[in-house]
Image (tube, grey):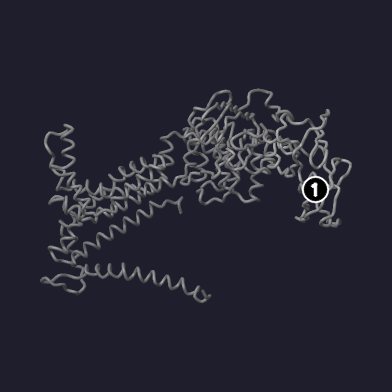
């Protein structure tokens, strides 16, 4: 390689990378979001810029209700999964090393499966003739199948919790794995009990992983439309379904784009907050 | 004064050792990392466990600390068996090789950790942390996180953290291994002074024999999971019992086989392939694989103190600054010797192939056996 080529290469590589990012991510995104500033006039799109869509979002309470119900649902899924995910990650971390890897792989396998199949599987679990009802009936816990487990917001929450759990467990597990054994030994050596070690050393060192997991979960849950569509019924109408319906039934792309812009702002806000709090001062 | 028989300082005669280890063993699966061994650590001494990697020295320390369960034996501290005590109940603290500082705590929080988990009142805790930070010279760094400290500062934080609960014994696992040479020497002096002034017993692990010599009251040399020899630095340096210890402390000229020709009151006469020599002191108890170990710096031109003599041919001469290293060969047996002499600006180096009359002092060599035990 000549000296000239060495000098030029990094610049060229940078241009290509930024170019690719712009071409494949930013331009399509922008060209879609810009629809949020157009409007629909008698079934065709009017390309004159307007803020009418945002005005509609703010003034129509049904959009707001759906938005807040969805945010609340996503927050509850994140909170539930933070507890479940932390317990799962901690359990895996406590196993012998050979077990740990197997368990992490088992946890990651569902991520490679089709999303729709996973949701249908959950429908099979939650339905009146589903696994949950059959099992609890067989155990004599309930006498009649419970139908309240499907086609409502609870069903959406349960389904999203199950399907999104790996996104919580993996970052927490990675954070736990990163804690050197000597640090735990040092805590014990200095007289800390198991509970003190957990509260003062393990938890603070692994919580950043939990914050990253909560961010993933919240962003994915708040924008999801497939799970609510398939297990939510009428009760489980969410913001994701609202957006989806603008592109399908309602054929109102500009309103759909405007709804998406709002969701994206929320997601970026959550990601920013997670970066701030998930990356404490001692790590920088 | 040290007792020449056992190498124990006088403190040992006063009472029980602070730490008394009997038949302690440790294994990883089928591998015996420590073969059952005995060790006494006296109150107030600086005892170094020295050995190459894989000798079991770190495992021994970790077993004492409680990080590694023993497979056999007793660990008595101040007369009480502590082998079954959980780590957090053991009455001593550890300084780790990687320092093991809590990354999410400041220097102040790290140092105060041992007091905080004991529920020490805040005012008292702050005073004691200030005192500990003063001792290690880190007063101005108390608000920093470990990632913002240099290696030496991290080391001193770890030391202050281990000392805060005023243990009578501190275990140190190669604490200087990660420091550069200059800082290392500085920390050696600091540690030694700190140990002497505080009176805390130090059980120190290292693979560096010069570090062990400069810092320790006594050294325990380990090899393949067993104790090879325990003694003062001088004893190990001048009176190694085995080839391994001799080689570890730099007595690299090994002459073998040796046969004891005569035993006198103050000396032993041995017969070797390169001649008959007089060695100060009695012969070793065992005679299996008996050999003569001579330090490179003990060799020199024959004179009135270097009464053991040899005729050796010069093979190579290398000038390494303050010292000159000469490779020599015994013609008949082809035995090779290394001689280290002080460089003399006036002297002309000997010609390659020339024959020199080399001698060594009976007190500066040792009869060693295959293994010490």
Q: Residue at x 49, y 30 (%)?
A: B89
Q: Residue at x 17, y 46 (%)?
A: A124
Q: Does the rendering let one see residue B263?
A: yes
Pinpoint the chain carrying mark 1.
B
Q: Residue at x 47, y 75 (%)?
A: A8
In the picture, measured across the screen, residue B187 lies left or right of residue A188, that is: right
| Image location of residue B31, percent across then percent down | 52, 36
Residue A211 at x, y percent in the picture: 35, 49
Say above or below: A246 vs B292.
Answer: below
**A207 vs B16, nearest the viewer:** B16
Furthest residue toward right: B304
- Percent across and percent down for residue A24 are 31, 68
* Count of marks, rendered view: 1
| Residue B177 placement, left or right of B341 | left
- Between A195 and A163, the residue placed more toward the observer is A163
Q: Does residue A31 sit above or below B170 in this rendering?
A: below
Query: Who is closer to the viewer here, B22 or A271?
Result: B22
Which residue is identified by label 1?
Answer: B330
């Amino acid at each position: 390689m000549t000296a000239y080529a060495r000098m030029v290469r990094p610049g060229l590589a940078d241009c290509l990378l930024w170019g690719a990012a712009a071409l494949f991510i930013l331009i399509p995104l922008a060209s879609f979001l810009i629809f949020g500033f157009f409007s629909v006039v008698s079934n065709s799109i009017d390309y004159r810029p307007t803020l009418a869509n945002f005005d509609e979002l703010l003034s129509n309470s049904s959009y707001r209700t759906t938005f807040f119900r969805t945010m609340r649902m996503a927050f509850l899924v994140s909170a539930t999964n933070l507890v479940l995910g932390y317990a799962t990650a901690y359990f895996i971390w406590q196993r012998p090393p050979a077990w740990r890897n197997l368990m992490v792989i088992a946890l990651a396998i569902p991520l490679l499966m089709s999303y729709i199949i996973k949701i249908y599987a959950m429908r099979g679990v939650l339905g009146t003739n589903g696994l949950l009802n059959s099992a609890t009936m067989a155990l004599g816990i309930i006498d009649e199948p419970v139908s309240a487990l499907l086609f409502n917001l609870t069903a959406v929450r349960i389904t999203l919790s199950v399907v999104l759990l790996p996104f919580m467990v993996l970052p927490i597990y990675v954070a736990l794995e990163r804690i050197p054994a000597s640090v735990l030994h040092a805590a014990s050596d200095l007289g800390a009990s198991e509970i003190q070690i957990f509260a003062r050393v393990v938890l603070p060192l692994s919580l950043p992983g939990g914050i990253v997991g909560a961010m993933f979960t919240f962003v994915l849950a708040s924008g999801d439309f497939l799970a609510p569509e398939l297990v939510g019924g009428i009760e489980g109408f969410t913001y994701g379904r609202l957006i989806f319906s603008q592109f399908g039934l309602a054929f109102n792309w500009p309103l759909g784009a405007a709804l998406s812009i709002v969701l994206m702002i929320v997601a970026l806000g959550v990601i920013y907050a997670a970066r701030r709090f998930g990356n404490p001062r001692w790590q920088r | 004064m040290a007792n020449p028989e056992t190498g124990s300082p006088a403190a040992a005669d006063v009472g029980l050792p602070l730490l008394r280890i009997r038949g302690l063993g440790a294994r990883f699966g089928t591998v015996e990392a420590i073969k059952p061994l005995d060790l006494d650590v006296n109150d107030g001494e600086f005892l170094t466990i020295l050995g190459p990697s894989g000798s079991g020295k770190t495992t021994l320390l970790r077993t004492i600390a409680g990080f590694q369960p023993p497979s056999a034996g007793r660990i008595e501290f101040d007369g009480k068996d502590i082998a079954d005590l959980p780590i957090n109940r053991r009455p001593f603290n550890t300084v780790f090789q990687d320092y093991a500082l809590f990354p999410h705590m400041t220097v102040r929080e790290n140092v105060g950790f041992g007091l905080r988990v004991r529920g020490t009142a805040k005012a008292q805790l702050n005073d004691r942390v200030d005192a500990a930070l003063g001792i290690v010279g880190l007063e101005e760094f108390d608000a920093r996180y470990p990632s913002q400290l240099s290696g030496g500062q991290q080391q001193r934080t770890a030391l202050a953290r281990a000392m805060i609960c005023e243990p009578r014994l501190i275990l140190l696992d190669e604490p200087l291994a990660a420091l550069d040479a200059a800082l290392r020497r500085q920390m050696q002096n600091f540690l030694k002074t700190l140990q002497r002034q505080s009176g805390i017993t130090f059980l120190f692990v290292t693979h560096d024999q010069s570090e062990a010599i400069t810092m320790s009251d006594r050294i325990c040399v380990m090899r393949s999971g067993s104790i090879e020899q325990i003694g003062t630095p001088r004893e190990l340096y001048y009176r190694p019992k085995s080839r391994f210890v001799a080689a570890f402390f730099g007595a690299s000229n090994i002459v073998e086989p040796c046969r004891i020709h005569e035993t006198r009151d103050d000396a032993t006469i041995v017969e070797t392939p390169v001649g008959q020599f007089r060695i100060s002191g009695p012969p070793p108890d065992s005679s299996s694989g008996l050999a003569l170990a001579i330090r490179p710096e003990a060799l020199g031109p024959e004179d009135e103190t270097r009464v053991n003599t040899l005729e050796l041919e010069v093979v190579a001469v290398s000038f390494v600054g303050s010292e000159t290293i000469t490779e020599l060969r015994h013609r008949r047996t082809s035995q090779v010797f290394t001689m280290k002499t002080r460089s003399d600006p006036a002297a002309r180096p000997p010609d390659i192939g020339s024959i020199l009359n080399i001698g060594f002092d009976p007190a500066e060599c040792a009869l060693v056996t295959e293994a010490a035990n």
